[in-house]
Amino acid sequence: MRTTNNIAELFQPLEDAICSLFIPNTISNQITPDHRNLLALPARHGGLGIFNPVETACLEYASSTAATAPLSKVITEQKTKFDTESLCMLTEELQTAKNNMLSAKREHQVKAEKQVKEALTPSQQRFHQERTRRGTSIWVTSLPLSEHGFNLNKQDYWD
């Protein structure tokens, strides 16, 4: 998600629509805040990846800023010519920034999963443990490809 600084609260109407319209119409049931937090987890952590834009806006902005900092520096310095060594350094800086960004996102996801698990009952925790086993989320994140006989088109889905 691309954001600018200090706009998390402006995403609240979107989050309200997700909670009151999108998710209930998708799963045919109202949800509690604990269920919303569970659905916000990535599929590999037992959720559906329906992120809360209010909660993720600041992290996404910080990640984007950090990831583009090396390029921003080059642009502001208005460099037009690069030698091999400076290109290698820039590439290394970009890769480091990307790795740091991914690491921060993973930490956030693990922390969010831990908070969700603490709110679950023991039977829900066992169910969640099964949902997060390696390979169980693949059906949620795979694309249906026609070359494998999975032909999905909008004509098949109508109200």
Image (tube, rainbow, N blue to C red):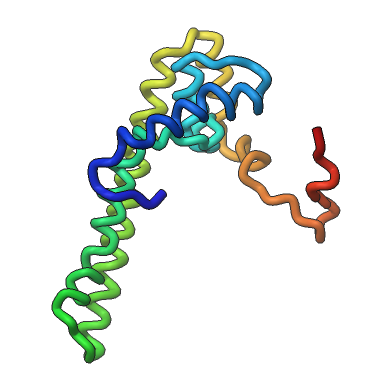
Q: Is residue 134 left or right of residue 155?
A: left
Q: Is residue 54 left or right of residue 68?
A: right
Vertical order, 138 against 127 (above or below): below
Q: Position of residue 19 (x, y in %)?
A: 51, 24
Dividing the image into 4 quarters, which one contains the C terminus?
Answer: top right
The front one of 118 and 20 is: 20
Q: Position of residue 156 (x, y in %)?
A: 85, 43
Q: Is residue 140 left or right of residue 70?
A: right
The front one of 63 and 111 is: 63
Residue 58 sits in quarter: top left
- Residue at image location 63% in from the left, 16% down from the top: 29
- Residue at image location 20% in from the left, 76% down from the top: 74
Residue 84 sits in quarter: bottom left
Q: Position of residue 99 (x, y in %)?
A: 32, 57
- Residue at image location 41% in from the left, 27% down from the top: 113
Residue 7 sits in quarter: top left
Q: Position of residue 43 (x, y in %)?
A: 54, 37
Vertical order, 124 against 99 (above or below): above
- Residue at image location 29% in from the left, 51% down from the top: 63
